[in-house]
Amino acid sequence: MGYIILNKEELAPGIKLFDIDAPQIAKKFQPGQFIILRISQKGERIPLTIVDAEEKRGSIRIIFQEVGKTTTELGALERGQSIMDVLGPLGKPSEIHKYGNIIGIGGGVGAAPLLPILRALKKMGNRIITILGARSEKYIILQKELRATSDELIITTDDGTLGEKGFVTFPLKRLLENGKKPDLVWAIGPLIMMKNVCVITKSFEVKTIVSLNPIMLDGTGMCGCCRVTIGGHTKFCCVDGPEFDGHLVDFDEIILRNNRFLEQEKISLEKYRNG
Amino acid sequence: MDKISSSHNIIEKRQQMPRQEPGKRIHNFNEVALGYTEEQALKESSRCLQCKKAPCKTGCPVEIDIPGFIKAIKERDFGRAIEIIKEKNNLPAVCGRVCPQESQCEKVCTLARKYEPVAIGRLERFVADWQINQNKEGVFKSPAGNRILQKAGKPLIKIAVVGSGPAGLTCAADLAKMGYRVTIFESLHAAGGVLRYGIPEFRMPKYILDYEINYIKSLGVDVQLNTLIGETFSIEDLFKEGYRAIFIGTGAGLPYFMGIKGESLNGVYSANEFLTRVNLLKAYEFPESDTPVKIGKKVAVIGAGNVSMDCARVALRLGAEESHIVYRRSEQEMPARFEEIENAKEEGVKFNLLTLPVEILGDEKNWVRAMKCIRMELGEPDESGRRKPIPVKGSEFIMEIDTVVVAIGQGPNPLLVRKIPGLKTGSHGNIIANPLTGETSVEGIFAGGDIVSGAATVIEAMGAGKRSARAIDEYIKTKWEGKNAKN
């Protein structure tokens, strides 16, 4: 029983790709949507964005970074093994239209959820400049795929081992200052990155879509665990999101809220590592 | 009306429910009420007057033959007793535990006019548990459902049930007994709905729920977990797949917040989040189970319903030093069952009545550190018939607490509802359905339970599921049978 892992790749140290057998989710998936999975009987439920779906094969693709206990345990699963529970597709699909010129920004593993969105936007005839950033060259993922989807690809690394040295916000700022004001910015990555992107785009008055990743349980609007403040209103990320107008997001709040189980997460990971 | 005549040998008092000692039980999640012994059940059953008109039966939303099953207990025929109950009620071990009998069957018990009513709920639980103990493996040897399906000798007609809570389980079981092929779709990884994520282990152990669900499966009901109707499949998909009717029992799964400052602070949970972590995801076993729950030293639970009592009692068991109920009205208006309030009091839950939170205060790290409240007094009755609480000017005070659970109620889950074109809904997002049949504004779609009524009781949801099952049978018979029923 469960959902079988059909394919596994390691894209970067600690960043893994799975294709999972889930025909019905593959059939329904639209860019921007996510799944909730649970590895085993005592497991927790975690949300992961769907990167791609192959309807014919009946598989969905997820890409995740090993951070805590569950993602580490997930990463240890091999092809042919299965995940006990997979629910989806969840959340509102991305709003794919012809906007014109778009800057896509993917930070770290955030490049993964960005990819299907940019693909869909490209198909609609948008012109896309993608900024792909990571700590270091070895953490840059999906370079080839994003290049194929973008009219221009700019890479940044914190340590300068690939592309520009620095953060994704550097080329973003430059593009905006040089008068290349896009119609839309689509940014997915660590919360602090999305926050900083929004500070810049707000000052240039460029609408910015971000994808939030709060802690979730059911993913169907039942528990309110993933509540975020958007423009002063409480929204449930699982059913009202995960994508929101970045200029309305209270990033400081979600950053603090995402840390609320840090202590327990550490205990859980240590216990797992010590067998 | 039946009278209590002098010829009856009246036993005025009911048998006491054996329970775990409060001092002991707040340190474990084991069941609090231990259930009657055989001797107690026999004694209690002998209190029943066997009234001809049996007012208790009319007080039961699922129409159980109450005097009938009590008589069977009295005759020590426990197997017969549970059979009688199961004719009407597919979840007897659940109902025997969580039904508010005191406001239903027991309220109208003839004895109740002068003495304590017969403990109908406890007797129901006794025979349900008796049966579970007879079948500890929970194996149902000859799946009755298959037999029924074959015996019916009619083409299989598929019915979809959305949601596996009390309404859905009841509707599915009844339809299966009528010979339909029923599939329940559940979004979570385990069936039971609110019985799974909402009701704590110490009030209803999960093995009881598992047993009851296995019984319903044995009737031929298929349960598809991890399936969110509206996303994984749409309603149109279900009709296309050949389901001839759909019952929606998606419950009241939308947690309400107070809308006051500080509700997004760390340490503030909705009751649903708090209970889901503990009940569904077993956070009380952390780190053996992966889901954490963080509890402080002083917990405030806002609201005074059954869910609030559950939260306050869970908090104690998780190690809170103080667990407080904070309620804006007085003791008299508390919506929780008397029994649950008593349990909570015995366990040391503190009641802060006529108290309204106005702001939750946080520390520099965004954690709850206190709650600002205002004292209330009761004024004239409001639209609910209860005296309206009015803030007392200048009575604000600070309650030092570090965890808040907001348990002020739930609304209907809007997720599926807003995806069905033409489905009429009420002002609270509830589905509008005929109370007698569950029929909605869309042909072939029926609904019942909290998604229609707003948050109510398990047994009321079961009653609605039952009525819908009958109505669906009628609908299929008039619309489909004879002409199109072959595939």
Image (cartoon, coloured by chain):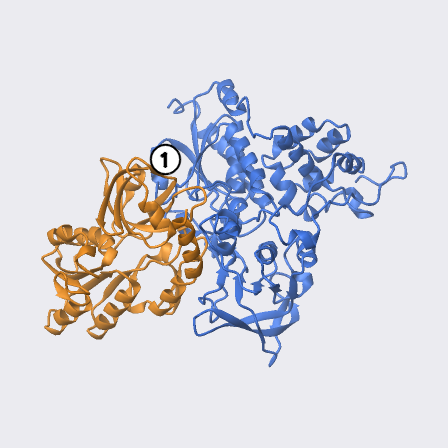
Point out residue B396 in the picture as x, y percentages from the top left corner. Answer: 58, 78
Going by the image, does B11 lie left or right of B294? Answer: right
- Reading the image, the residue beneath label 1 is B239
**Hue used for the chain lettered B:** blue
Q: Regarding mark 1 in the picture, which secondary structure is present there?
A: helix
Q: Which quadrant of the structure image shows residue B401?
A: bottom right
**A34 or B228, nearer to the observer:** A34
Decide: few, some or many residues near mark 1? Use Cα within 10 Å; few <14, some 14-19, many ≥20. some
Q: Is residue A150 visible?
A: yes
Residue drawn at x 42%, y 43% is B187
Going by the image, does B400 lie left or right of B330? Answer: left
**B418 or B48, nearer to the observer:** B48
Residue type beneath disc 1: Phe
Q: Is residue B452 visible?
A: no
Point out residue B456 in the picture as x, y percentages from the top left corner. Answer: 57, 50
Point out residue B113 in the picture as x, y percentages from the top left corner. Answer: 80, 47
- Figure check: B330 above or below A8: below
- Figure check: B161 above or below A90: above
Residue drawn at x 53%, y 51% is B284
**Hue used for the chain lettered A:** orange
- Chain of the residue that carries numbered disc 1 in the rendered image: B
Quadrant (top left, top right, bottom left, bottom right) of the N terminus of chain A:
top left
